Image (tube, rainbow, N blue to C red):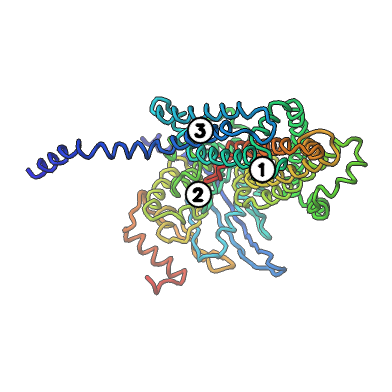
Amino acid sequence: MSTYSLSDGLASGTPRTSRAPLLATWLRESGVGVLASIAWIAFGLSCLWWEDVGDWSRTHSLGIAAFVIAAVALFGTVGADYLGSAGQALHKRAPWLVALGAFLTVWEVATAKLAWLPLPFFPPPQAIIEVYTDDLPKLLDSVFASVKLQLGGYLIGATVGFLTGVSIGWSRAVGYWVHPVLRFIGPLPATAWLPIAFFTFPSSWSASTFLIALATGFPVTVLTWSGVASVSNAYYDVARTLGAKPSFLVLKVAIPAALPHVFVGLFMGLGSSFAVLVVAEMIGVKAGLGWYLQWAQGWAAYANMYAALIVMSLLCSGAITLLFSIRDRLLVWQKGTVKW
Amino acid sequence: MVAAALAEAITHQAAGAALDIEQVSHAFDLDGAELPVLSDVSISVEPGEFVALLGPSGCGKSTLLRLVAGLDKPKAGRLREDEQRIRNPHPSRVVVFQDPTLFPWRSVWDNVALGLEAQGVLKSQRHRVDAALDLVGLSSFRNAYPHQLSGGMAQRVALARALVNDPKILILDEPLGKLDSLTRITMQAELVSLWQRKGFTTLLVTHDAEEALVLANRVIVFSERPARVKADIRVDRPYPRHRGDPYLADLRRQILGLLGLDATW
């Protein structure tokens, strides 16, 4: 009997208390999305409200684009229930949208409108957009050149490093000869070779490929080697009692067991090869994003530099994402790998 | 009936190999000094026998197993499998170690397939992998990775990986040593039934006298390092054996006495 009166009381209480919590829940669920929309409206208004202090052609378009993004954020939030996974993705990124909108507003006001930050060193967002629309062919050529150089050097360096590492780890004789050379040459920053490389190699492109391969190869070699050396003898014992030949021990035991180490080496090699790539392009190669940066600096085209930096960062980050997704695919058997 | 029993006896004869350990001595090199681990050990194992090697911790039992497996070579003496000198590892003598040592990058199925793959016969013999997994009751875990298995399951996979090769001699190096006591008892029963069905010769290293007596039909007791054969005890009791069997309890007392532990009994 008492349970009945309890549920009766709850039922009668529901209509009265439900309206305020409904609004509160709605605000909690959609508030950030609405806020994101407001932040982008603010950015759009900041573009269009005042006159620019300089002469930029994309201010108006940028303002319109900001309003479009604000509208997408708003409708995406209100209609999240009908959008499925897209709505959820938007919901998850809404706080970032707020931060981004606010940052762009402050940037716009501080540069193009009130010139708090000195021009031309701090160009407004529309100046960078202008680079992407007006200087696209040259930028794309640079991206293409950089990717080509980086990819060639990295693949050569990674392959040679991997093979060297496996050989040192496996064979005592190879280790005897290669290890001292590795210790002597490896720690030298690859950029220190620049002056020599540029006049000993037939072209600046082959010199840069060599340097990138060198920068990649050293960490890959060392980590592959340590990976192969640290494989537990128990694995070899098991394989040998099951009838494994030496080639099986290398290909099916040592290398798979060493792969987690190899990927650490590939990751480190990627980082140091980026540094070499940019320096090589700035100094010797007449193409690529490093060269573009150098060229933009010569012309005091600061907006072009920022634009190139953004592209470069996307490319480097994309390369690491690619490496990590290959690793995740190959090393599914590992527990708790870092998500990039 | 008699014929069937006879036929079974014959297949048992065929499935297991004889093992002769003749005056084997072995030593380790430790910083230039020689540390003797086996001293003049001679054991002759009949085909299909289940022999337990019992001895104090670190006495050299596992070293003897490595010699039988062909992973190491003895400093003196000879080992023979069916009159053939043992010089190298061979899939007819497979070891199950104390740690399952499954390859973490391979799924359960691929781990069990390891031997056939190493011998280059996997393509035509895939059904043997499925059969071995069935035998240890882990068919539904064929796609799991080792880190997803419990200790007992991992050791079962290791057992399947050994059995898929149809070994003539199964070498067990304390395979149940790290399992909890309940899993242990279950797996002891499974080992006996596998051995009875397959008829391979079994060599089991253990430090547990009770386990030796429940499983083996012969228990060899070793001395402290360097290991010598101290006693060779026949256990003539039918399977399945009961832990409380007074005959086994009596043997156990004898064995612990040999190991210098009679005061604790």
The kind of residue tagged 3 is: Ile
Neighbours of disc 3 within 10 Å: few (<14), some (14-19), many (20+)? many
Q: Is residue B134 visible?
A: no
- Secondary structure beneath label 1: helix
Q: Which residue is mark 2?
A: B202
Q: Chain of mark 2?
A: B
Residue sitting nearer the eye, A19 or B130: A19
* Among the 4 quarters of the image, the one containing residue A302: top right
Residue A121 circle label? none
The spot of residue B67 in percent (x, y) is 62, 54
The spot of residue A79 in percent (x, y) is 40, 27
Residue A41 circle label? 3
Task: Using residue B127 as the reference point, say whether residue A252 is left or right of it.
Answer: right
Query: Is residue A238 placed above or below A108 in the rendered structure?
Result: below
Residue A255 circle label? 1
* Residue depicted at x 40% and y 52%: B184
